[in-house]
Image (cartoon, rainbow, N blue to C red):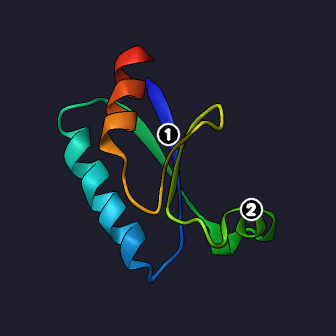
Amino acid sequence: MICLHFYYRHACHLCEDMLEDLARLRREWEFELIEVDIDQRPEIREKYHARVPVLESAQGLCLSEHFLDQATLLSYLQGA
């Protein structure tokens, strides 16, 4: 199964929006979503602080930042 990492923080409306978009896509596409709250891990917070939400492949390929790039994500899912 394809695994994606979703980096977010609480009370972030962009994060909530992207998570809702991902939930809709999961109805049609099978992928595992690992949700990572960047504020729980200082080393991750430094990397993603101003970029959240961020969606990455398990290999660290950035698929979306701030807003879901559906075309890029679907291209990735089709090719994986």
The percent position of residue 55, horizontal first and vertical second, equals 50, 49
> Dividing the image into 4 quarters, which one contains the C terminus?
top left
Percent of width and height locating residue 29: 26, 30
> Which quarter of the rendered picture does the N terminus lie within?
top left
Q: Quadrant of residue 75?
A: top left
Indicate the secondary structure of the residue bearing disc 1: strand
Nearest to the eye among marks 2 and 1: give it. 2
Disc 1 marks which amino acid? Answer: Leu
Counting labels gives 2
Q: Is residue 46 left or right of residue 60?
A: right
Disc 1 marks which residue? 4
- Mark sitting on residue 47: 2
10 Å neighbourhood of mark 2: few (<14), some, or many (≥20)? few
Q: Residue furthest bottom?
A: 11
- Secondary structure under tag 2 reads helix
Amino acid type of disc 2? Lys
Q: Position of residue 20 (x, y in %)?
A: 26, 60
- Is 36 rendered above or below residue 74? below
